[in-house]
Image: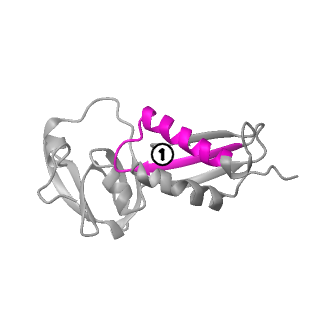
C-alpha cells in the first residue's frame, strides 16, 4: 500500500533551500507511513536557537511546499522540531551550536570530562572545567572526543564559567 508521501530525499531537496534561507539546515527527516494520518517529521538545526515563532514559520512554508508537491493537503501531519538535548555532539558545528552548554565527554584515552562548551576552532573545542575551586579552559581536539552529550541543567551556570566560555561576547573578526 502506498501513501503517496514523498521520500526522505525528496523532502530534504524540497525544503532544504527554504530552511537555509531562514538560517537552518535539515538534520533529519523521518517519515512514518504507519501513523494515521501519516507523519513527516523534520529535524532542523542552526546557529540561532529554533524558537516557537521560527518553528511555526518553517512549518507553514514547509506545509505549503509539501501540499504543492503531490496534492498531499490534509493527508499527513507535519512536525518541525530541533534535534533535542539528547542528540550526541558529533561534528564541529554541533559543538559550535552547543556553546555555553554543559556537556559530558568521553575521550579516546578512556577518560571522562564534564565541562562547559566554549569556542570551537582549529578542530578543537575549548571546554571550561572545574579545577578545585577555580575554573580553567582545556582545549580538546575534536578527534579525541569519542562521545559528547549535552547535560540538562536545573540552575544557571556561574558568571565566571560563562565568561571563560566566551558566551555572550562576539570575538573580533568572529566566525
Residue drawn where x is 76% and y is 37% of the image: 37
- 100 or 24: nearer the viewer: 24
Give residue 121's position: percent from left, percent from top: 24, 64
Residue at the limit of the structure toward the top, as seen here: 155
Quarter that holds the C terminus: bottom left
- Could you tell me if residue 109 is visible in this image? no
For mark 1, give the secondary structure.
loop
Q: Which residues are magenta?
A: 39-67
Label 1 environment density (alpha carbons within 10 Å; few <14, some 14–19, many ≥20)? few
- Find out whether residue 54 is within the magenta segment: yes
Q: Please, is residue 155 above or below residue 150 in the view? A: above
Say left or right for 10 vs 110: right
Give residue 19's position: percent from left, percent from top: 47, 51
Picture quarter containing residue 61?
top right
Q: How many marks?
A: 1
Residue at image mark 1: 86
Q: Please, is residue 116 above or below residue 143 in the view? A: above
Residue at the limit of the structure toward the right, as seen here: 1
Give residue 113's position: percent from left, percent from top: 31, 54
Amino acid at each position: 500500500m502506498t501513501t503517496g508521501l514523498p521520500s526522505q530525499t525528496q523532502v530534504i531537496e524540497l525544503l532544504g533551500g527554504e530552511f537555509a534561507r531562514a538560517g537552518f539546515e535539515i538534520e533529519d527527516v523521518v517519515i512514518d507511513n504507519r501513523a494515521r494520518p501519516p507523519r513527516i517529521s523534520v529535524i532542523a538545526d542552526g546557529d540561532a536557537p529554533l524558537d516557537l515563532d521560527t518553528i511555526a514559520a518553517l512549518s507553514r512554508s514547509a506545509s505549503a511546499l509539501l501540499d504543492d508537491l503531490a496534492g498531499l493537503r490534509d493527508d499527513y501531519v507535519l512536525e518541525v522540531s530541533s534535534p533535542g538535548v539528547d542528540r550526541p555532539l558529533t561534528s564541529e558545528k554541533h559543538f559550535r551550536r552547543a556553546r555555553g552548554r554543559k556537556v559530558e565527554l568521553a575521550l579516546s584515552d578512556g577518560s571522562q570530562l564534564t565541562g562547559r562548551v566554549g569556542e570551537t576552532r582549529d578542530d578543537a573545542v575549548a571546554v571550561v572545567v572545574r579545577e578545585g575551586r577555580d575554573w580553567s579552559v582545556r582545549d580538546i581536539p575534536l578527534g579525541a572526543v569519542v562521545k559528547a552529550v549535552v547535560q540538562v541543567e536545573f540552575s544557571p551556570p556561574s558568571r565566571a564559567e560563562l565568561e571563560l566560555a566566551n558566551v555572550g561576547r562576539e570575538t573580533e573578526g568572529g566566525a
